[in-house]
Amino acid sequence: MYKKLSTAILAASILLGAVAPMTSFAAPAASAVQAKKQGEFTTASVERKSDGTLVVRWKASADLGAAKIYWSTSPDNIEKSGKLLAKTYTAFNGHVTADPNPNARIYFLIKGGNGDTIVTSERKVNLQGAFNFRDLGGYQTTDGKTVKWGKLFRGEELGHLTASDLKYVQNMGLKSIVDYRTDAEVNALADPVIPGAKYIRTDEGNAGSAADLNSMIASGLMKDEASAVAMMAGFNKQMVDAPKFYIQLMELLNDPNNIGLVQHCTAGKDRTGLGSAIILLALGVDEKTVMEDYLASNVYRAEANKKAVEAVRQQIGDENVVAAITALMGVQKEFLQAAIDEMKAKYGSIDNFIEQGLGVTKQERAKLKAMYTE
């Protein structure tokens, strides 16, 4: 039991409170040209309620008048290739809908009366066999662009995907699966074959650690929370100092044939967390937003982590050790910050790390931004 646990360790209800009441809105008399001068959409999101209902939310810098909501199973050209879902008003700030196609991933486009548009989707991919599989789209960059939806994904081990999950993922148009796991992890739970997607391992030939939980505790690496945090911070620094995974990742991303790429490890939070951070930083997303995406693993893995920690608590009476394992099961700001600090200390800046540490030329980085932002 300990050994199985060590492999995993290492490796609100939604209310539409922002919607304005019907009586508070009066249709604007301003022309479309005047409205265009008034503002634009600033953010949008989609959340799934427990009954499968979707809540589409948005914010704008001004009242953009009447609005249309379109949906599609593709994130591209939604207004032209998708279907009209609803007509509403931007001042309502949101719309609640049944899932228009429960068997496929859905992307929405909201169009204001002034012609301004914004695309959004669920951050978490709606799968039964994975809780931390998510889309890196929708994040704004410092140069005024937005990371495209449906092109870049992050996830955990895929061996628990159900038959319906596999159809769902296949229909998302995945082209490349990048697996960071060691031989031991892959042998424990191999990835399923997803038709249309090529499979790339970055750590093939690395047998991986065979240490069980007892030996890890005896080593002092997990004597308390502080020791676990220090260990994970050191692990992240090492991945910056020897970034072979991410050199390969950047090369794959620069090939248009790989658009529709998911990178994953076992829990989808450490190796994948740093890989996702590097992608977003390379595309120009600010450090605060990158950190928020990194820490979101704690939200998506909360239930699974709680069960695992409780199982350990029943076997180990030392609460200091339980605190260490709890830290390892999740992610903390200190983990990713150690990697970012190492980039700056060793290379002078994140930009220099991307160029010198990962070998991404300025031309290649410009190509990445052109391919993955809009």
Image (cartoon, grey):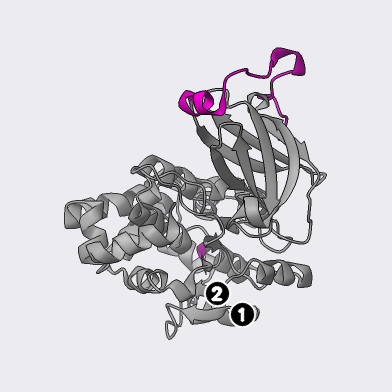
- Residue 343 within the segment the image draws in magenta: no
Magenta stretch: dominant secondary structure: loop
The kind of residue on which mark 2 rests is Lys
Ranked by sequence position, the earlier of labels 2 and 1 is 2
Contact? badges 2 and 1 (CB < 8 Å): yes
Q: Nearer the viewer, residue 90 or 338?
A: 90
Among the 4 quarters of the image, the one containing residue 356:
bottom left
Label 2 SS: loop
Q: Which residue is mark 1?
A: 196
Residue 211: % across, % down: 49, 73
Q: Work out whether residue 206 or residue 355 is closer to the camera in this orientation and state it.
A: 355
Q: Is residue 190 left or right of residue 294?
A: right
Q: Residue at x 70, y 56 (%)?
A: 126
Please identify the quarter of the rendering in which residue 44 is found. Answer: top right
Q: Which mark is residue 48?
A: none
- Label for residue 175? 2
Tell me: 53 left or right of 370: right
Distance Cα–Cα, label 2 vs label 1: 6 Å
Residue interval drawn in magenta: 10-38
Judge the density around disc 2: few (<14), some (14-19), many (≥20) Cα neighbours within 10 Å.
Answer: many
Residue shown at 48%/77% (left/top)? Answer: 182
Foreground residue among 188 and 120 = 120
At x 66%, y 61%, the residue is 130
Q: Quadrant of the N terminus?
A: bottom right
Q: Give the crowd class for mark 1: few <14, some 14-19, many >=20 residues within 10 Å.
A: few
The image quadrant that residue 73 belongs to is: bottom right
